[in-house]
Image (cartoon, helix red, strand yellow):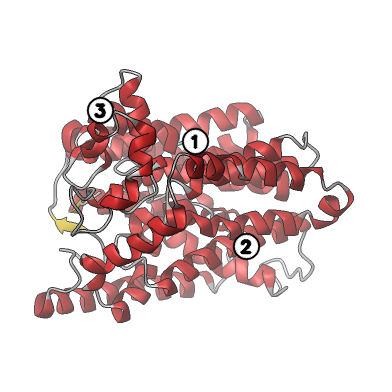
Amino acid sequence: MTRPAPRDPYAVLAAALLVTAAVLVGHRIQHAHHTLRVNWPPLLATWHPHAGPGTPAALLVAAAVAIHGPALAARLPWRALLAAVWGTSTAWVLSLALVDGWQRGVAGRLTTPHEYLRAVDRFPDVPAALHDFAHHILIGSPDNWPAHVAGHPPAATLTFVLLDRLGLRGGGWAGTWCVVVGATAGVAVLVALRALAGERLARRAAPFLVLAPAAVWMGTSADAYFAAVAAWAVALLALAVTGRPAAWAAGSGLLFGLACYLSYGLTLLAFLGAAVLLLRRRRVRERPAPLVWLLAGLAVVPTAFTLAGFDWWEAYRLLVTRYHQGAGGVRPYGYWVWANLACTVLITGFATAAGLRRTGAVLLLRPDAGGRRHRPAGEAATAVLVTAALLALLVADLSGMSKAETERIWLPFALWLLPACAFLTRPRAWLAAQAALALLLNHLLLTGW
């Protein structure tokens, strides 16, 4: 990684062409048929150039990370680096959200008619509500749930019910929860990378995990919180199979189980979990205790919800029906099956497109910029994790259950594509490009999330 790879611009160009095609074709389809159900395809957004109270802070954070991020990531003590990533990520996400102002950018996001807070008052008796949950999923059912409540297992809504019971009521507290907890996702990815791929690559990836364009949506939806739970599930498993106490795997299993009851799509975390076990398969064979602890922890949340009367499989079956009752039944698969990937480019940035090209070179053992064919184990491990996340996205894409809005839905997997940027040279230039994309998206579009 000493010289820039001449093929990186081709990857960036291909990604830019994909986004351009998705925009142009999407606008034509929407104008002619109105079937995409988004105002600025491929994103759920509206063209609305604007600035706001968060603009100065966003510019300051972007400049600071792009200029000083790589050097600080290389020399800070590890724990200080993790704290810096969390703090700076929070500042970046919050400043971008505040471009739209406090009410629209943070406090009002989870209070709209389709969001979770609209159903909090319907959980005075939690066991009874769980037992009756599936009866309100379909649009034609009496008192059917708001779209996001119906579209997710009940742990998502119960999170905000719990915040309400603790006295942290309203959209301000709910939005802050999503921002602050969601910002830990990058920390979790770094913990996993260090355990599986080594500290050098984790440090190189750190600034890219902070300055990701995904931050535009991390501060405006509950999916940021889901992404953090998913990331810590993978991170704890990585720690458990690399010499830490095996009991860490129980925590991992608990979070994997919780993730599946936050979002049905997070069952695809199995790809990342399998990648971690694959990378340490010899250690797991010699010391299977982490796997036992993992399975024990994994059983806790499903067992608790099942005993409370919630049938995950029945609810998912009803959700598929509701999905096709709404916009999902109108949006054309033929467009979204590739336009979703353009959304992924926009949330991970063009630097990640170049990083994915290099990831492919690592997996195929092609010579890198320095002429090496045999890559260090850390580079191979990073490539495996990134590939596992990419496979999860592709499966979600082909399923037809992710037509549009993937700029938020796929956040838990898209964050694991960002470590591919650790393979890049000239990090400051790439970071500047990432920040520019995020700032343009946030200031030119009024996003729906």
Left or right, 189 with respect to 92, comes to: right
List x then y, in percent, for residue 95.
30, 35
Q: Amino acid at mark 3?
A: Gly
| Label 2 secondary element | loop
Percent x, y of residue 368: 68, 68
Relative to 19, 350 lies left or right: right
Asked which secondary structure carries label 1, the reply is loop
The percent coordinates of residue 316 (x first, y second) are 40, 59
Give the residue displayed 27% in from the left and 41% down from the top.
116
Q: Residue furthest left?
A: 32
Q: Looking at the image, do the residues carrying marks 2 and 3 touch, with CB atoms under 8 Å apart?
A: no
Distance of label 1 from label 3 (alpha carbons): 19 Å
**Total tally of numbered discs in the picture:** 3
- Mark 1 or mark 3, whichever is nearer to me: 3
Residue at 30 percent of width and 25 percent of height: 164
Question: Can I make out residue 103 in this image?
Answer: yes
Q: Nearer the viewer, residue 109 or 80?
A: 109
Q: Is residue 356 above or below residue 297?
A: below
Amino acid carrying label 2: it is Arg
| Residue at which label 2 appears | 3
Q: Earlier in the sequence, mark 2 or mark 3?
A: 2
Q: Where's residue 347, x and y in %?
A: 38, 56
Residue 199 in view of the camera: no
Residue depicted at x 52% and y 57%: 267
Q: Residues within 10 Å of mark 1 (few under 14, many from 20)?
A: many
Question: In front of the other: label 2 or label 3?
Answer: 3
Quadrant location of residue 386?
Answer: bottom right
Which residue in the structure is indicated by mark 1? 184
Label 3 sits on a secondary structure element that is helix
